[in-house]
Amino acid sequence: MTIGETSLPTATAKRPSPLMRLTHPRVYCSLAALALLLLIPLVSGSPFVVHVFVTICVFAALSTAWNIVGGYAGQLSLGHMVFYGIGGYTTALLIQHFSLSPWLGMCVGAALAALVGVGIGYPCFRLRGPFFSLATIAFLEVVRLLAIHFNGVTGGSAGLIVPLKLGWTWMIFREKINYLYIAFGLLLLCVAVSYVIRSSRLGYYLTAVRERDAAALAAGVNNTNVKLKAIAVSAALTAMVGAFHAMYMTFLEPATMFSLSTSIEVAMFSLIGGLGTVAGPLLGTVLVVPLAELARGWLGSAANGLHGFVYGSVLVLITLTLPGGLVGTFGKRFARLIDALPGGGVRVPDRAAPEPAAITGTPGEPVLVADDLVKTFGGLVATDHVSLTLRRGEILGVIGPNGAGKTTVFNQLSGFLAPNSGTVSIVGRNGARATPTTPDAFARLGIGRTFQIVQPFGKLSVLENIMIGAFLRHAGVEDARAAALRVARLVGLEDVKDVEAGTLPIGGLKRLEVARTLATEPTILLLDEVMAGQSQADTQRMVQLIRTIRDHGVTVIAIEHNMQAIMSLSDRIAVIDSGRLIAEGKPQDVVRDRRVIEAYLGEDFVDAQGL
Amino acid sequence: MDIFIQLVINGILLGSMYAIISVGLTLIFGIVRVVNFAHGEFLMVGMYGAYLLAAKFGLHPYVSAIPIVLLLFALGAIVQRFIIQPLLSADEHIQIFATVGLSTALMNLALMVFGADLYSVPPSAVQHSIALGGFTLVIGQVVMFFCALALVAGLHLFMQATPLGRAIRATAQNRNAALLMGVRVDRIYVIAFGLGAACVGLASALVMPLYPVSPTIGTYFVLTAFVVVVLGGMRSMYGAFFGALIIGVVDSLSGYYIAPDLKEVVYFALFILILIFKPTGLFGLGRGTE
């Protein structure tokens, strides 16, 4: 509850390991706050208080697990109770039929739920926002109806009573406080997993995929894979909590185990606390659940519907007033307060990584060969039999009028578009020739590309944006940070490295595009109009930068409208017009080519000049 | 064979109810581009309204249709103006949460006011059946079928032949271009949301004589309406209409030939398959997943 983050924990990520630094106020305050969840009911001793705190721990754990998919990955599942129910029913049925301890049943349920999660996620992750939510609701409904239908197995609507065997082996107790220990343990597990994901490469990748899937792909992130990992972990944790909760209630029925309204509540707690933050779901639950439980305790059945009404209204109000949730809105300020406590404010000095090893290979050998590419959109032939060869160590400029199809060619050279016919083969970083098909595969093999329309991860800092690229070659957060810092220095973004990327001016954003791409340590760099919108001085710097990059052995292919810059920079120029490659050669030859002048200035001009 | 034909007839009549609800949902999604998760609760509000008018003033729901439609139009317009409009440029998940929250709040409000009991209006002639060529038809459902036809025809004329309808279509196709042409887009959205809710108002008045109302009735109908809308291609009113008839028939046939309690499983499975493999809808009229 005391860890305040917005999108990414810059300070927490600087720590080599969270447990190494118990003296940091964020760590000890968080632990102290968490301990209250255990201490308050222990001191009070009232069964009702214990029940409320078990409920808090269960829902906080569920919400924390949900947040891994709903918050980090941004996939708003509204049918998450399907995993909870799977955990509960698996555990109960294994006790009933095989006398298997619920501790083991819990693990079986978790594994099963992870599988189901992947089964749901794989086809559904391509759906946009509300349609993903609808699909998850549909899955929940289908499972609930099947659970009712197959009453021979599940007991149907009448429900299923957990065999009552007492003791730790069977997770059934007379002393209610024991349930609290388990619930609290599960909560700790969920928060720990959530924290570890948040401060690891996976957490950064999930944010990247959520914010800009195209840019994440270009940085070599396998979008589907990353989300599947998130849903598998989330489903497994949810199932474990479901298993425990079934043992706690000792009764299972489809209506409560696969409940849509509970699924919505769990998501709601995350939103109130702060989507995509570690502490948010816990904070949201701690604030809302006691209110609802107390209202139920005081008003009894007279309050039928009251807590739901309050939940719904709070949800609407939060969306209208605090869409970032409590942590998202107040987290930064609160974190500063916490950091002022003893032990805070110790900063690990920034470390920049050394240059990566120089790229080896024979200068002049073909590193990228596009053979007879054709791409049509309906009746429009956007790429008309284009063949290109890129040679190691050169800078190839690509020019052509607007709408000529230059970016379409780039999209095929980086895997974002599949050509209708023709092939793209590249020499990978390992020196072997390959014909990858997906953008992330291209990136892994060493193709880096920028986007003409800049694609920053707006809510991440500049350095974190570059880290998304750096993660491709550096799995550890600290290594990636160091590598990103090296690139930030090279590109001239070090001064603004902690600024939120969305606030940069266009010149800075263009350099950030290059930086994120460079951080993937490409051997071939595809630059799409990186000088557009830059000032004269910035253009000079960019030209200088591209030369520096090439001197490190990187082969460059650049689309550019800034003629002066591209002519002085390029070793060769290729001209594309109406989807066709109309000229190729040395800059001084290309500018005199009749077809090129025609393409830019029209036939009449050519005739008038007597060319 | 007679049973099969009777089932298809039942299905089409049932489908016409889904059609009215789904056309409203499609209007809202197609124009405002917001998925209204509270759509079912609008239906519930309308049904309680029809029930109250019947209980207090003895009005037949068909008569209450007029005030209910107006009431629901107002409700829709208010929701758009005060909840959706401020969130139009917000993240998609915030919009989802807003309508989901509205749905939860309305459902539980009904639970607080009316309790969990079922309420119905006094029996009337529309519950009776007529025999037609050896098949039986429930009068109330036949009325619904013709109302659904009239609704689609009326909306078609409205959209094609009136200046307001043209402005609505322009807004649906390109919000910014419509703005540049002087269309008051915010107002169009309010009207569109109101119209979508008004369709549900009509549905609730027509449904009331045949089904009792409870706080959760909305969830029951709206999930089916979502299936229909996805089937119909999300943005097409005509797609929604035919999609509804198809789902009605699927409902009726699978209830008989598979198992009554599995008919929802059949069309939810259909829903998931269409979302995944044919996101443009069965007739290819929409571009759903973009």
Image (spheres, coloured by chain):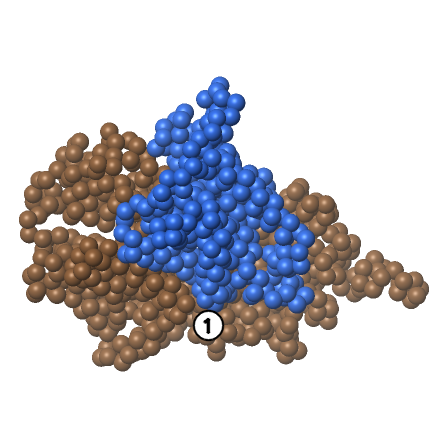
Which residue in the rendered view is the most extreme toward the top? Answer: B1
Task: Judge by depth and name the residue closer to the eye, A52 or B142.
Answer: B142
Residue B221 sits above or below residue A64 on the image: above
> How many numbered markers are drawn?
1
Q: Which image quarter: residue A96?
A: top left
Chain coloured blue here: B
Mark 1 secondary-structure assignment: loop
- Residue picked out by circle 1: A500
Viewer-proximal residue among A210 and B195: B195
Q: Give the left or right position of residue B153, taking residue B247 as reference.
A: right
Q: Nearer the viewer, residue A19 or A47?
A: A47
Q: The brown chain is which one?
A: A
What residue lies at 69% left-to-right and 61% top-to-bottom? A397
Residue A370 relative to residue A20: left or right: right
Question: Which x, y percent locates residue A432?
Answer: 54, 46
Residue at image x 20%, y 68%? A33
- Residue at 39%, 35% (x, y): give it: B265
Bin the neighbour count of mark 1 within 10 Å (Cα to Cα): few under 14, some 14-19, many 20 and up.
some
User: What type is the residue that disc 1 sits on?
Assistant: Glu
Q: Where is residue B216 in the image (x, y as percent from the top left)?
A: 34, 48
Identify the residue at horizontal 58%, vertical 39% (top origin). Answer: B283
- Residue A301 percent coordinates (x, y): 19, 54
Q: Nearer the viewer, residue A195 or B121?
A: B121
Left-right relation of A191 to B83: left
